[in-house]
Amino acid sequence: MGGLMVRVAIIGGSGVYGFPVEEPKDVTVETPYGPVKLRVGLLDGEEVAFLARHGEGHSVPPHKINYRANIWALHELGVERIIATSAVGSMNPEMKPGDFVILDQLMDFTVSRPRTFYDGEESPHEWKFVAHVDFTEPYCPEIREALIRAARELGLSYHPRGTYVCTEGPRFETRAEIRAYRILGGDVVGMTQCPEAVLARELEMCYASVAIVTNFAAGMSGRKLTHTEVVELMGKKGEEIVRLITR
Ligand code: HPA
């Protein structure tokens, strides 16, 4: 990517398909995992990259996202810090639809996704070795702190920590699964933090994620879940998300 140096990236999840940056430029970054389209622009004078996780028009389901290409592309641009958004279901009665959760922990229940850059001999790049990264604290404490401060200053309804359970999807969970995840200590459930957060750590980028509760998880409300309610809630929170991240 000839000469572009972008230090901060925003990854928009469900409902966040763009970001109001100035002087927007659409760029395509080639990676060993395929090309990635993203937008670069100025936010408050800082050059930032914006990447829509689910692609144009939300065309890629969570289990098919090319997470490695996405994270590699951001690294290629020089990105050091990533702020991601993720729509989640809540299994914690205190975390209600519309609330923000500045995630501090996660559990990985995905089953079929490529999840590492350190694939030994199979790696499509020059690192053929084996590596095991520390993941005790999966989220960047500095960006988390900044997000918590911004959420407080903006008077948003937020929770300063929360444990994210990552499921494979694309189906929503069963009542029994949600009961089990609650017992294990989960607060919210979604389908995309793994391997996204893992891959950012593998490339030593500081990654944090603000989760937006769009619904109570399966069996918590006595109602069926629909993707429509996720999209509708996100539509209502769009403006607050932009203010939070910009701050
Ligand atoms: N489950 C999994 N992923 C989700 C949910 C949910 O209830 N809501 C938004 N993303």
Image (cartoon, rainbow, N blue to C red):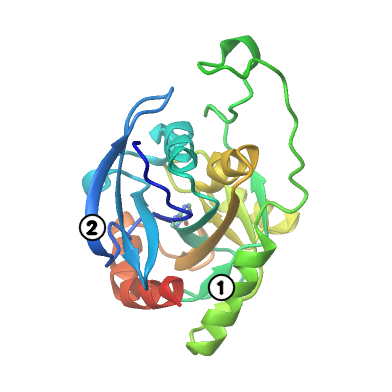
Asked which secondary structure carries label 2, the reply is strand
Kind of residue sitting beneath label 2: Pro
Instruction: Answer above or below: position of 133 versus 46.
Output: above
Check whether the beta carbons of the residues at disc 2 and disc 1 lie within 8 A of each other.
Answer: no
In this figure, which residue is indicated by the disc labeled 2? Answer: 24
* Label placed on residue 147: 1
- Percent position (x, y) of residue 184? 74, 53
- Percent position (x, y) of residue 138? 68, 51
Look at the image and tell me whether residue 132 can be seen.
Answer: yes
Q: Residue farthest to the front?
A: 3
Quarter of the picture holding the N terminus: top left
Q: Is residue 228 left or right of residue 62?
A: left
Q: Is residue 159 left or right of residue 227?
A: right
| Residue neighbourhood size for the residue with mark 2, other residues' Cα within 10 Å, grouped as few (<14), some (14–19), many (≥20) | some
* Label placed on residue 59: none
Q: Looking at the image, which residue is at 27% across and 67% down?
A: 20
- Percent position (x, y) of residue 42? 32, 64
Q: Nearer the viewer, residue 81 or 194?
A: 81
